[in-house]
Image (tube, rainbow, N blue to C red):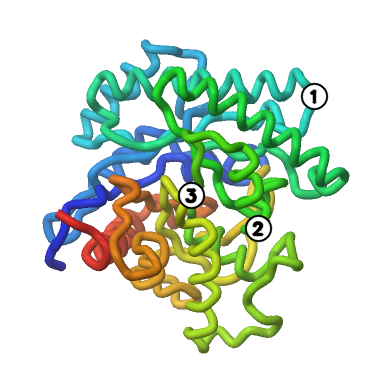
């Protein structure tokens, strides 16, 4: 496979070693293992450029400060990789919770931004955002949609103001399991209401596909009931509508595949099923459909972010510990970059 472009940089995510794992599922895969498999992946001489990192136990101690950031940087650099986007561990303080919950949320964002700034200053993190979500379930949010949406907006505004002190941007993850962010219309409304220059959207192809299907928000469904997946034109029209609304906000992007179903393991609520890159049941033509996010309505490259990331949460350990899995993922990422990248 010939490499045509060298931007955006290609990153793997470390948090699939944690998300959906644990006592009620499978053992966590260590950060060291995730880095080793990422660094070992290679397709025709092309390798991953970096990793996006979840700043949560057991991979990382959010209270370890600059010393922890240095240890993380050294560990990643030893594999010839860079660091991109970071995930703030905000789930101990739901945005729709009490004042103390919201304070905890903002404090976790602050600590994550401190880590992010330190990594930037060290030169190992040339680009990327800090990812957040509402840390709130859809059913909890639905008990008081107006009041809870107001709480989310206020919490996000406080978090943005803190992030600005460290020169960081926050990206809200569009995923159907997060209350107040579980539909594309709700996501746009939240971002507009937060009204801060340093907030944007993190698009994940697996999750945004479910936006078109109206999971957890039937009123915002775009694809018709009983949709025939063999009719690509209907799907492409739905993706055009989603991306027209959310692309202007998008500052971080995950390449992913989805088979049109929801899935959850461990403590993680049901959300988009991340399929393997070569899954025959995948509903997306990944390299083509990534273009809805990476190009504008006129087909021009947006160049809105300098790296893209693969997210493969809730794969079984049997799948994740095979090197072929990561080579297949890298091959798919290269196809995306060849189609929608630049040099």
What is the secondary structure assignment of the residue under circle 3?
Answer: helix
Residue hosting label 2: 185
Of badges 2 and 1, the one in the foreground is 2
Image quadrant in which the N terminus is located: bottom left
On the picture, is 342 further left or further right than 178? left
Along the viewing direction, whichever of 76 and 29 lies nearer the viewer: 76
**Quarter assignment of residue 194:** top right
How far apart marks 3 and 1 lie (CA) works out to 28 Å
Residue visible at 75% across and 67% down in the picture: 218
Along the viewing direction, whichever of 14 and 219 lies nearer the viewer: 219
How far apart marks 3 and 2 lie (CA) works out to 13 Å
Residue visible at 59% across and 59% down in the picture: 272
Residue hosting label 3: 249
x then y, percent, for residue 206: 51, 61
- Relative to 42, say whether 72 is above or below: above
Image quadrant in which the C terminus is located: bottom left
Along the viewing direction, whichever of 115 and 312 lies nearer the viewer: 115
What is the secondary structure assignment of the residue under circle 1?
Answer: loop
Q: Can residue 317 be seen in this view?
A: no
Residue visible at 38% across and 39% down in the picture: 52
Along the viewing direction, whichever of 103 and 304 lies nearer the viewer: 304
Of badges 3 and 1, the one in the foreground is 3
**Quarter assignment of residue 290:** bottom left
x then y, percent, for residue 122: 25, 20
Residue hosting label 1: 98
Mark 3 Cα-neighbour bin, 10 Å: few <14, some 14–19, many ≥20: many
On the picture, is 294 further left or further right than 102? left
- Relative to 50, say whether 339 is above or below: below
């Amino acid at each position: 496979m010939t490499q045509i472009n060298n931007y955006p940089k290609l990153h793997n995510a470390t948090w699939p070693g944690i998300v959906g794992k644990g006592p009620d599922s499978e053992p966590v895969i260590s950060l060291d293992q995730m880095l080793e498999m990422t660094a070992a992946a290679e397709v025709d001489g092309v390798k991953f450029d970096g990793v996006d990192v979840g700043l949560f136990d057991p991979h990382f101690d959010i209270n370890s400060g600059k010393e922890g950031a240095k240890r993380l940087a050294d560990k990643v650099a030893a594999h010839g990789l860079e660091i991109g986007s970071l995930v703030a561990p905000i789930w101990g303080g739901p945005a729709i919770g009490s004042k103390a919950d919201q304070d905890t949320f903002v404090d976790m964002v602050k600590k994550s931004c401190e880590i992010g700034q330190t990594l930037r200053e060290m030169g190992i993190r040339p680009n990327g955002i800090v990812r957040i979500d509402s840390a709130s379930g859809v059913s909890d949010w639905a008990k008081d949609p107006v009041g809870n949406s107001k709480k989310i907006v206020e919490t996000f505004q406080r978090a943005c103001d803190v992030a600005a002190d460290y020169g960081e941007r926050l990206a809200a993850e569009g995923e159907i399991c997060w209350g107040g962010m579980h539909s594309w219309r709700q996501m746009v409304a939240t971002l507009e209401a937060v009204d801060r220059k340093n907030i944007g959207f993190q698009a994940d192809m697996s999750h945004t596909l479910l936006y078109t299907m109206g999971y957890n928000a039937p009123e915002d469904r775009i694809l018709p009931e009983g949709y025939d997946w063999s009719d690509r034109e209907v799907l492409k029209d739905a993706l055009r509508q989603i991306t027209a609304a959310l692309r202007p906000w998008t500052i971080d992007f995950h390449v992913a595949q989805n088979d049109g179903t929801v899935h959850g393991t461990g403590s993680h609520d049901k959300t988009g099923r991340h399929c393997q890159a070569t899954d025959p049941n995948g509903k997306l033509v990944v390299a083509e459909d990534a273009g809805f996010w990476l190009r504008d309505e006129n087909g021009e490259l947006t160049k809105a972010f300098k790296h893209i990331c693969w997210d493969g949460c809730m794969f079984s350990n049997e799948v994740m510990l095979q090197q072929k899995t990561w080579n297949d993922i890298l091959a798919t990422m290269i196809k995306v970059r060849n189609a929608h990248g630049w040099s």
